Amino acid sequence: MVNPALVDPATVRATAAEAWIRAQPILRNYRAFYAQALDDADPSYVGGFGVFRHHPQPPTPAGPPAETPAGTPTGTDAVDTPYSRAWLDLRAEPWVVSVPAEDRYHVLPVHELDTVYAGFIGSRTTGPEAGDHLVAGPDWQGEPPPGIRSVIRTATRLVGILGRTRLTGNTPAEVAELAAVQERYRLRPLHAYTGTPAPEPAPEPVWPVWREEVPDGVEFLSFLDFLLGFFPPDGPVPLPPAEHDLRGRLTDLGIDGRGEFEPAALPLEVRTEIARGIADGRTLLNRATAELRDRNALFGTRAQIGADFLRQAVGAAVDLHGLPAEEVWYGRWEADSAGHRPPHAGDREHVIRFAPDGLPPARFSWSATLYALPGQQLVDNTLDRYSIGDHTPGLVHDPDGGLTLHVRHKRPANAEHSANWLPAPDGPFTVVLRLYGPDRSVLDGRWRLPPLDPR
């Protein structure tokens, strides 16, 4: 219920702009959640709550980057690390995520309703050993049972997992090996893990049907009001003061997490100011996205992100569920050393030369993937090679121990160059370098990308 005495039309515009920015990752996440967990007619439907859907087959030029609903990750990571998707409802009880012993790189990151990460299960954080890991929501007050290796506490009652598992090649045998690893990921509600009676189930919400026009008008506040009911401000995971401040101003407008907000109940002058605030927020987000130069700082835990709502919104806009830099670091060649932006293959060869002391420093693995522009499509080629890296068989190092990658449209006649060939289109392209488990020298800027040199 709106409290007119507390609503100052002069401040509504600024509150609406901040709320619109704050809502972007929540709304984009709900869009993915609705398609994957609720809508059984959507191609990306995983099967409901507590179910993994695996995608072991990597993308190819003939198909879309990966099976994704609109607005979710582009699937570019799936070239190296195909996805495993799941959603968990933590209202009634925690869930246990079990992983096998596995030396290959993998990560099962638990993202909250606003896309901030609650924790990570995988090679970097929990190691290669088999283990059972507890994911507990803000309402749980119990103790972990024996056998639990780690506990991830969440600030929200709904969470998702977009897991990645390293694919070592795209042959049928290698894809089958990956699929076998993915199938050993397991989800169980806590009562099934402990063999105790099931708790009383949480009531089934009336999930609002997602529509693409929701973020464009005052109705976004109705969705935000509903979704904040899964995001209590007073849970065991501390929220920053700015979050509490915004929640207080939203409560004055009748947005308190009960899902009963009615835009029509607002005075006309307040609705007008909200519309202006939405426009302000959209302008701010568009500008910040256009000015983005480094995506590596966009993603992280609540301790890392804090109350930087704009940073969260930009991250959700450019790569929903992107991983933090300490998990995977991204470098991109958007221009060559001659200043061509973007670089253009045609009949020109480009080379990327890693010096002996400048090889990609990654704890687990690295790869360079080429995408045709516009659209970031993989490039059809005679080798069916879309990325090159430490997993590439037959890679030839330079006599001094360095490594030269040959980026060109036509296959090199020289056998050693062909072994290090990264096929490019007869047109513009970009190359993305991924370091899985980057060295500290990467994170602090001491290691830098070598140039993309035209020849």
Image (cartoon, rainbow, N blue to C red):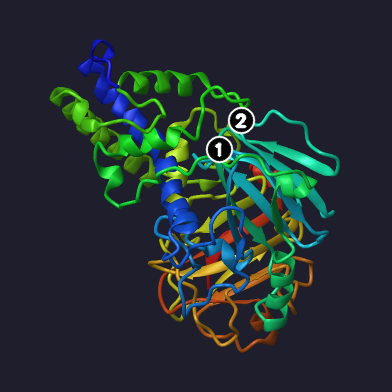
- In the rendered view, does 247 fall on the left or right side of 80? left
- In the rendered view, does 46 fall on the left or right side of 354? left
The amino acid beneath tag 1 is Arg
Q: Residues within 10 Å of mark 2 (few under 14, many from 20)?
A: some
| Up/down of 449 relative to 300, above or below | below
- The residue located at (66%, 31%) in the rendering is 140
Secondary structure under the numbered disc 2 in the rendered image: loop
Q: Residues within 10 Å of mark 1 (few under 14, many from 20)?
A: many
Q: Nearer the viewer, residue 354 or 276?
A: 276
Q: Is residue 2 visible?
A: yes
Of the 4 image quadrants, the one containing the N terminus is top left
- The residue located at (75%, 72%) in the rendering is 397
- The residue located at (43%, 53%) in the rendering is 34
Q: Is residue 439 visible?
A: no
Secondary structure under the numbered disc 1 in the rendered image: loop
Q: Nearer the viewer, residue 449 or 297?
A: 297
Residue most extreme to the left: 268
The amino acid beneath tag 2 is Asp
- The residue located at (63%, 71%) in the rendering is 56
Label 2 belongs to which residue? 139
Q: Does the residue at mark 2 contact the one at mark 1 (Cβ under 8 Å)? A: yes
Q: Which image quadrant is residue 14 in?
A: top left
Q: Position of residue 382 (x, y in %)?
A: 56, 88
Q: Position of residue 79 (x, y in %)?
A: 59, 68
Q: Position of residue 389 (x, y in %)?
A: 68, 68
Inter-mark Cα distance, 2 to 1: 8 Å
The image's mark for residue 157 is 1
Q: Position of residue 68 (x, y in %)?
A: 47, 63
The image's mark for residue 176 is none
